[in-house]
Image: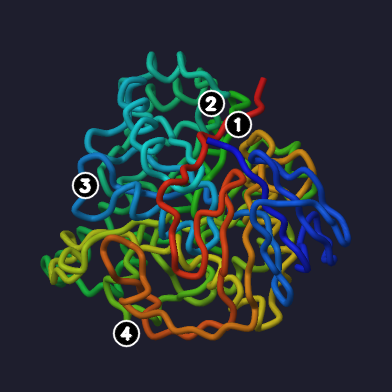
Amino acid sequence: MRKGTILIKGGTLINRGKRFSADVFIKDGFIEAVGADLTRRADKEINADGCYVLPGIMDDQVHFREPGLTHKANIKTESRAAVAGGTTSWMEMPNTVPNTLTQELLQDKYDLAAACSPANFSFYMGGSNDNLDEVVRTNPRDICGLKIFMGSSTGNMLVDNEVALDALFAKSPLLIATHCEDEATIRANAAVAREKWGENIPVAQHPVIRSPEGCYKSSSMAIELAKRHNTRLHILHISTAEEIVLFRNDIPLAEKRITAEVCVHHLTFNADDYATLGNKIKCNPAIKAERHRSALLPALLDDHFDVIATDHAPHTLEEKASDDYFKAPGGLPLVQHALDMMMVIEQRGEITLEKIVEKMCHAPAVCFEIDRRGYLDEGMWADVVIYDPSTDWTVTADNVFYKGGWSPLEGNTFKGRVRQTIVSGHLVYDRGLFFEEQRGERLLFARD
């Protein structure tokens, strides 16, 4: 239900590469006016003096584990964590149980989200070796894309039939998002490690097993397929320096047929952090050596990489604590803290807040052709974050909203914090309080 009005007064807006003082008036779910000293009557007025007013973050890659894996997380808990961190829209992956490989299973997930998510939402259809018929009858205006695992990950939805893979690239009407790691390379590296350590392989070997060479080989193959068939391709979670050259930065994002995502953890951690965090930062593709981490940010700044996401992938602490390398799952929970992590980089002077907003808010809307979102423009859906840069706080288990109750960032102190989050015109989060009666909207896509 979209009704009511909100007036945000006195904040500093970050929008379309500019920083300026203005008020924002929201009515019936949309931004009706942006300007100085607005005097509209409103049901709710928010004083944003001293705060930044940002478009809502759009995360194009999350795993919320529902259905089938709800001991780890569910749509409600992880969506609450998302809005607490300023993420107002999310796109969720198909490696749930059962895998989201049919129209009916896809609709089941939409129904679940509509009943409980405070954030806006969309879901990927999963690609498999034998579901091309389901893929081709999917309306590209209705879902964010088709996810293809070109390397096994949690849920093992690997597409390893070359004929099926070629057909998906040739015939899919959808944007294809790929997880790119070469499975043969991973298996060969794992066999070498198993000979030396058995099942108790040190987690520091993870980026050796899931090597840069495997990432580059798979990404190159995906790009070759996309060029052959003129497929709209988006490669997820780039983690190596070598892959940067595969992507263009000489044309506007809206004209690109092949785009790339980088994730906050690959911008934050490096292989040295396995010594203290161990399996808590084990993920696929792996966090790698410092030379890779330090190359990713410049590639983001010069637009070889197009969007920032989280690949939020929760598991229980018990699962993560396994001494068996092959049983400890890959993935870490991040959606509540993505903006905080990027603001650390901003406070070091390595990126501007304007660029963060471009890559976390504007660019996902352009990349996925999302209808009327991603900007603080009049006529857009009112997805708005009020961020207080003066608040110091420390991540603890008590202020983590993930169902799993843990974060690899526990003990880290951040300067600045999301104060309020507005989704589709509703105030859904305010300084630790959630307004449970409010629901997000299904994302729609302005595609031909």
- Earlier residue among tags 2 and 3: 3
**Residue 174: assigned label:** 2
The residue under label 3 is 69
State left or right for residue 417 relative to residue 212. right
Label 2 to label 4: alpha-carbon separation: 41 Å
Task: Measure the C-alpha gap from mark 1 to mark 4.
Answer: 40 Å
Mark 4 sits on what residue? Answer: 276
The amino acid sitting under disc 1 is: Arg
Check contact, mark 1 vs mark 2: CB within 8 A: yes
Q: CA distance from mark 1 to mark 2?
A: 7 Å
Q: Nearer the viewer, mark 3 or mark 1?
A: 3
Q: Mark 3 and mark 1 in contact? Answer it, CB < 8 Å.
A: no
> Rounded to the nearest whole Å, what is the CA distance between mark 3 and mark 4?
28 Å
Q: Residue 290 location in percent, x, y?
A: 50, 77
**Whole-Å distance between the Cαs marked 2 and 3?**
26 Å
Kind of residue at disc 3:
Leu
Crowding at dot 3, Cα within 10 Å, few <14 / some 14-19 / many 20+, comes out as: some
Using a 10 Å C-alpha cutoff, classify the residue at mark 1 as few (fewer than 14 neighbours), some (14 to 19) or many (20 or more).
many
Q: Is 10 left, or right, of 280 in this rendering?
A: right
**Looking at the rendered structure, which numbered label has been put on residue 232?**
1
Q: Quadrant of residue 313?
A: bottom left
